[in-house]
Amino acid sequence: MERDQLELHAFGVCPHSMTARWSLMHKGLDFRSFEVPLVGRWRLRRAAGHNWPPVLVDGGRPIHHLAEIVRHLDERVPERELVPKNARLRHEAWLKIHWAERALHYLVVAVKYLDPANLEAALASHGRRGPQAILLRAVPAAQRIRLVQHGYRRDGLAAYQRRLEECFDFLDHELQGSPYLVGDRISAADMLVLGNLRTLEGCAALRCIDDRKSIGRWRDHVESEFAWAARDGCASTGGEGA
């Protein structure tokens, strides 16, 4: 691998993978993208020493975990920062990134994969044919095992749905009168929250944001303002690409 060559190993419908991909595109960096099915992660471990996407490989050096990828890209290309340089805003951005990684993400995954109706609707929204649909059909069992490991079970679904609505209330409040989640520029916090919303596309759980006008305005603005956020079915579907 050439020194400056970038490779992103990602899973298309994962919010963390979407954020890593969007971060690279926002920075204007060329990279090769490899789709990692969650049921075949041994290939990722062999290639990058880690078995959960996203993994960025920069000149042969693997960078694991989204937060580390974001830090690395801001160090590599300081322009169009993913996390603000201002100390106060930087602290706020990391708080919201960690909140979206932990609280929001696991509630999104629980509501999507533990509710059969939501899961079927999400699968249908990606189409019943093609590589993405095949990959998605293999994911639920792996995700349910992961959820159990983090204390999320089907008998708690109603509580997870209420907590997810509380997360949406928090987001709507944070976005009142603000174009972005942190300051007046797009950040990795916006990308990760948008990725989580994309993960719920087709699910009834996403309809509850219709009454939360600030979220809708923010989402429409980000998707129209930034080419990488265009509604393209979440991400590329497999193999490798530019």
Image (cartoon, grey):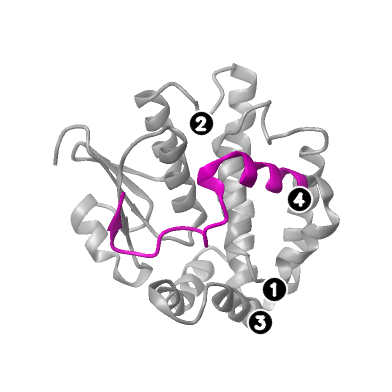
Q: Quadrant of the N terminus?
A: top left
Amino acid marked by disc 2: Leu
Q: Residue 84, image x and y in percent?
A: 56, 24
Q: Nearer the viewer, residue 213 or 39?
A: 213
From the viewer's perspective, is the residue at label 4 or at label 2 nearer?
4
| Element class at badge 3 | helix
Asked if the residues shown at circle 2 and circle 1 are in contact, with their CB atoms under 8 angstroms apart, the answer is no
Q: CA distance from mark 4 to mark 1?
A: 25 Å
| Element class at badge 4 | helix
Q: Residue 5, image x and y in percent?
A: 22, 38
Looking at the image, tell me whether mark 4 or mark 3 is earlier in sequence order.
3
Q: Residue 232, image x and y in percent?
A: 52, 58
Q: Residue 20, image x and y in percent?
A: 43, 45
| Residue located at (28% from left, 57% from top) | 240
Q: Nearer the viewer, residue 130 or 146?
A: 130
From the viewer's perspective, is the residue at label 2 or at label 1 nearer?
2
Amino acid marked by disc 3: Ala
Residue identified by numbered label 4: 216
Residue identified by numbered label 2: 82
From the viewer's perspective, is the residue at label 4 or at label 1 nearer?
4
Q: Which residues are magenta?
A: 217-242
Q: CA distance from mark 2 to mark 1?
A: 34 Å
Asked if the residues shown at circle 3 and circle 1 are in contact, with their CB atoms under 8 angstroms apart, the answer is no
Amino acid marked by disc 4: Gly
Amino acid marked by disc 1: Leu
Looking at the image, tell me whether mark 2 or mark 3 is earlier in sequence order.
2
Q: Is residue 137 above or below residue 190?
A: below
Is 229 contained in the magenta span? yes
The numbered dot on residue 117 is: 3
Q: Is residue 221 above or below residue 107?
A: above
